[in-house]
Image (spheres, helix red, strand yellow):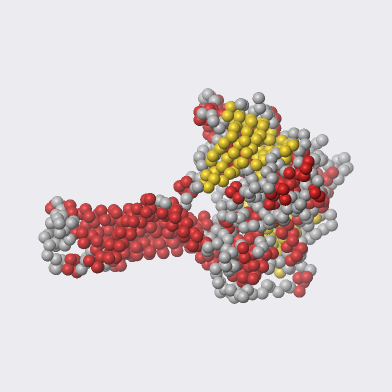
Amino acid sequence: MTSTATEPVSRPGATPAPPRQHALRRFVRAFAARPSGLVGLGILLVVAGLALCAPLFIGNDQLNVVMVNGPTLAPPSGGYPLGTDQAGRSILLLVIWGARSSLSIGIMATALTMLLGSSVGLLAGHYGGWIGKGLMHLTDWFIALPGLPLAMSLAAVMGQGTASITVAIGVTSWASTARLVRAQTLSVEARPFIERARALGAGNTQVMLRHVLPNVTPLILVSSTLTVASAILSEATLTFLGLGDPTSVSWGSMINSAFSGGAVTAGAWWYLLPPGLAILIVVLGFTLTGRAVEHVLNPRAVNGR
Amino acid sequence: MSTAPSTTPAAPSPAAAEAPALEVRDLHITYPARAGRGPARAVDGVDLTIGQGEIVALIGESGCGKSTLARALVGLVKPTSGQVLHRGAPLRHTGSALKAHRRQVQLVLQDPGGALNPRQSVYDAVAEGPRLHGLRDGLTERVHGALSRAGLRPPEEFTARFPHEMSGGQQQRVVIAGALALDPSVVVADEPVASLDASVRGEILKLILDLRDSLGLSALVVSHDLGLAWNIADRVAVMYLGRIVEVGTVEEVLLRPRHPYTRALLSVLPEAGRPGRPVLLQGEPPDPTAVPGGCRFHPRCPLWAALDGPARAEAGCDRRELPVLSGEPAPGGLVSCHLAEQPDPIGRPVAETPLEPA
Amino acid sequence: MSLLKVRDLRVSYRTGVRESPAVRGVDLTLERGQTLGLAGESGSGKSTMALALLRLLPPSAKVTGQVLFQDEDLLTAKWSRLRAVRWSEASVVFQGAMSALNPVRTIGDQLMEPILLHEKVGEKAARRRAAELLENVGVPARRLRSYPHEFSGGQRQRIMIAMALACRPDLIIADEPTTALDVMVQAQILQLLTDLVREQGVAVIMISHDLSVLTQTCDRLAVMYAGRMVEHGPSEQVFADPRHPYTRALAGAFPTIGDPSSRRAPTGLPGDPPSPGSLGAGCSFAPRCPEAVAACRTREVDLWPAGPRRESACLRVLPEFANLADQPVADQPVANQPVKEGGAV
């Protein structure tokens, strides 16, 4: 009978497992063989777990500056493992709560970056001529623009808040992804199977979506994990500068409060260190995971066979 | 991409029964000048005809333009001037015309491993052509049929496999199946067996012959290998620097070659017990950006090198242009050479003159 | 003393827990100034064997046997001795030579490198020698300052040959030296190799899948299949009158123009060259052999005499199998089996 399924039709039992599952199993096995990747993944899982479960054990009474009643700017003690801030809130709980904001902004900004950058890169790589050149000029322009001042201007224009930070980060980081994706697109399109697809009658859309995109996706995946790390750093920087939502807690804003609250002069290291360390640990987690994924997907770079 | 996909092959014109399967007329393909280099005349005036059910071999060395010509036949490269005709109807480079053309004229490339998307299963690779042309009814039958005709039987054993799980010969069969899935009338093959193991070549060549015999498929096979022409071709055209220098049946061109380039190529083939000494041409073919004037082969031609001043002035190989050879089959074959027509000073026809002083 | 004597060379690659044999017991002898052609396809082990001679294989390869180069076993020689032998006494023209040149250094530098390493001469003398080498292979000496990308494929191959000759070695191993080249350039390179080898008395092991090329340039011919040598002898005799069905198939793959038996009749073998891990008992060629008999699948094959200075690893050369009619015919050759994952491509 006729079949319009896109999966290959085959006699049951006569063919091996569908290759996508096979490839996934291979990927998981290879990833599990890299200790650094497992460490990175572990860090991320712990942090994500804490961030997601935070509402279960952190309530408004611990976050609202009016409602807390702990000692102000107290060093670490039994009841407050990481000390308190100038309003009396537990630093530990603040760090955990801040993870939610930092991570979510980081991930959303990354999604925006990857979407924008991949689209531009794919189109620029596929279409030569005016479109390609124009897109690359645009990309180069954005690369040349200094990221931080641009982000600050954008955030200032759009007003304080998470949305403006997310957009600001996305707008300033997409260009390097676009460059990367364009290079990979060019290399994929030089391969003979693209020519064959054209000879069979494929148009531009079909070539890009069916042939180029699946071959560029591994690169985008790796790039994403590394981009999240830098997005989180950017978020911290911007909120530290006071551009974020003043009412929400994030690691950057904690460092900001620490400075403006006089923690330095008071010698309250427990206020400055934890958020910075948290950023460090999360960035490390993403970087280790990203590198491990890269090594798994590109074994030739490692083995030197 | 808003044109409706055609589900039937283009109706042949009334003269289709007589018209050759594929034809090029006065084809010129020139790549524009780039920094520091002039324009490259990749194809510099070619007439070629492939009759229905005929296998024509296009032989030449790298840089002669044969691959560019092959791609122009499939519509992948737009000619600077001249025409590509399928069954007498000229090809226009519009989206719908190209698409209709590609249902009839298909391409098989050199490197089968590279020609298949590593992420596509065999089924998807073969089904791609029909899907692009909107032939979704009976797609599975079509794919299985194409795989069987390409020699991969039973087809169900291969549909779920991926290219890297198959040998070079099998991959090339998949590529051929992908071309067959559209029921083309002509296949253009660019070095179809050059990347394959020696013991597998014969099987793929046999397949091309079988497809001609069983389906009436016409073929243009582009290669640098004269032995391949001997194995499967009916007619052969020898190409040098953008022009065809000799054309005729395989027996005419390979057994009684007349152009000095063809003769030199045949003389260096490493076969034990060949009569005569091999004629090694000096250097390599020049770049298509620097095509010599007059006969483009004259700087490397051993016959020209053997002539003295007065004889050279009379022959005019460095000044007089040669006409483009006709694409139609002509008895005895055609050769594009000033000296092939003239007897040499001793009076023997040039084809029998040894290429080097004895 | 023979220049090179190889005894029972075996090479296997360790991939994970599996060991796949690439070369399964090869013997060969080469005298000074002699040329040997090594024919085979992918999976035959010919390139592996050639690289094993100079211990150029990666650490994952296990090499056993003896490689006696001028009566000195290279497989057990000390590292310093091996380095001294490499290039100054035995050099290699690698497969894909065109990309074996470093793109960011001039060819002059690359030519001078082995000279400076092995011979105690100053830079000026090395440059003079490099210029001389270039002229010998037909490239003008003034191109010493050019970079590899400024040359054509044929010229780069000539440069590789010049590099191989730089230290006046006794042995050159040429791995597919003309495979990617045009017919005319191939003829030029082969002529060059033949002339140089004759002038300097260098022994050559040339590897190719093209039997006719090897017959033209080499005195002796050896054919490898699935890691073993299946036939060897004087090249013209082996080509004209093969004593092994595989040699016959290889010879037929490149037809003689003018031979009516190959006109519109390409000959090939069904199936594919075997992958190293999938070999069973008996003759490894039997699954594809058009002349196989039942005994071919069970009996161990070895190289048996098949004429003066000729040997063949086919049961048919044995007197007991000489009469075809007596033997039960084996099953049909297996065609178009899907290759298992990891098979030879």
Horizontal arrangement in the rendering, residue B331 relative to residue B1 (left or right): right
Q: Specify whether residue B31 is in view.
A: no
Q: Quadrant of the N terminus of chain A?
A: bottom right
Residue depicted at 71% across the width and 74% down the height: B11
The residue that appears at 56% across and 48% down in the rendered structure is: B36
Residue A226 image point, x, y percent: 37, 56
Please provide percent x and percent y for residue C230.
69, 42
Question: Which residue lies at the image location 81% right of the left edge and 50% below the top edge?
Answer: C325
Q: Is residue A38 visible?
A: yes
Vertical order, C15 against A28 (above or below): above
Quarter of image, res C216: top right
Which of C333/B244 is in front? C333
Q: How many marks?
A: 0
The quarter holding residue B28 reads bottom right
Instruction: Give x and y (percent) for residue A262.
Output: 14, 55
Left or right for B70, reference C16: right
| Residue C283 screen position, x and y as percent | 68, 46
Most foreground residue, C5 or C252: C5
A273 and C226: which is toward the camera? C226
Q: Is residue A150 above or below residue C3?
A: below
Left-right relation of B269 to B100: right
| Residue depicted at x 73% and y 68% | B87
